[in-house]
Amino acid sequence: MTGKINSYKDLIVWQQAMDLAVTTYSLTKAWPKEELYGLTSQIRRSATSIPANIAEGYGRDNRGSYQQFLRIAQGSLKEFETHLQIAERIGLATHDQAHHMLLATEGIGKMLRQLIVKLAPE
């Protein structure tokens, strides 16, 4: 999307993070019920934390706060990647599922880094 940003919803990074969260919920629906309060909960929480922190940071009234929330989103992204890799190693996610989602996290991570740099004081 090009043009003026009027809302956090206009940010491609937020849109892609939302897509990742939705994909995560679809993936984890098939996981065993005994994981509901374990890895399922953890990966869902980290996935939803990414777009939520992007949105919260956007709503803050200064660049420093916005950057801080973007950094929190970066941390949640790395947490998500780790949970996903664990899920793959223990057989909850296939290699193809994990690979597809990790490609998405790579793009989201790059956009978060670029946005943090763009918001830095000059």
Image: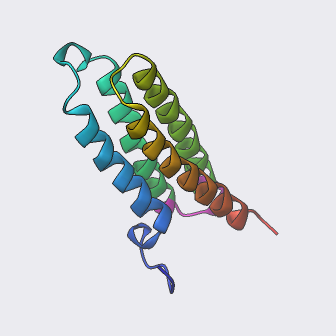
Magenta stretch, residue numbers: 58-65
Image spot of residue 55 (x, y percent): 43, 58
Left or right of 57? Residue 44 is left
Looking at the image, which is closer to me, 61 or 26?
26
Image spot of residue 108 (x, y percent): 53, 54
The colour scheme used to paint the residues is rainbow
Left or right of 44? Residue 113 is right
**Where 4 falls versus 90 (above or below)?**
below
**Where 69 falls versus 99 (above or below)?**
below
> Image point 31% across, 17% down: which residue?
38
* Residue furthest to the bottom: 3
Looking at the image, which is closer to me, 53 or 111?
111
Left or right of 120? Residue 99 is left
Image spot of residue 74 (x, y percent): 58, 44
**Where 96 falls versus 107 (above or below)?**
above
> Image point 63% across, 63% down: which residue?
115
Please tell me whether residue 46 belongs to the stretch shown in magenta: no
Count how many numbered circles sit on residues in the image.
0
Image spot of residue 64 (x, y percent): 66, 56
Which quarter of the image is occupied by the C terminus?
bottom right
* Residue furthest to the right: 122
